[in-house]
Image (cartoon, grey):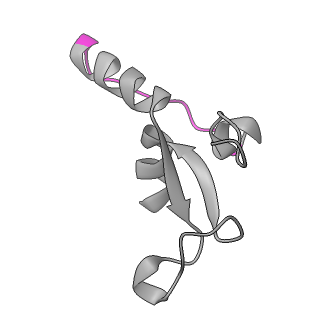
Amino acid sequence: MKLFGKQCFIDKLHLRQEARHYTGKNQRKKMNKRAKRLTYHHIKERQEGGKATVANGAILSEENHIWFNK
């Protein structure tokens, strides 16, 4: 986390412009938890030989990671 910081790359650069829609309180609670958890995203995917390195990664919230991979 020291190298990447403690903020989601997508949120930091305001890359996600769409509104986030929730169908109920439970979904909002679940997604708020996901928005706080940070995950490592491979720029070049592991399946394609991408390594878990500083140069090949970005920190994303779990919610944005799911959105980005769609």
Quadrant location of the N terminus? top right
Rendered view: 52 above or below 38:
below
Report x, y in % for residue 59: 60, 48
Report x, y in % for residue 40: 51, 54
Report x, y in % for residue 68: 50, 55
Q: Is residue 70 magenta?
A: no
Question: From which residue to which does the magenta span run?
Answer: 15-25
Residue closest to the eye, 39 or 29 = 39
Q: Residue 21 is drawn in which quadrant? A: top left
Report x, y in % for residue 27: 26, 23
For image coordinates 68% across by 45% down, the residue present is 9
For residue 35, side relative to residue 5 (left or right)? left
For residue 58, side relative to residue 45 (left or right)? right
For image coordinates 50% across by 43% down, the residue present is 64
> Which is the main secondary structure of the residues drawn in magenta?
loop
For image coordinates 56% across by 46% down, the residue present is 60
Residue closest to the eye, 31 or 39 = 39
Outermost residue toward the top in this view: 25
Quadrant location of the C terminus? bottom left
For residue 43, side relative to residue 15 (left or right)? left
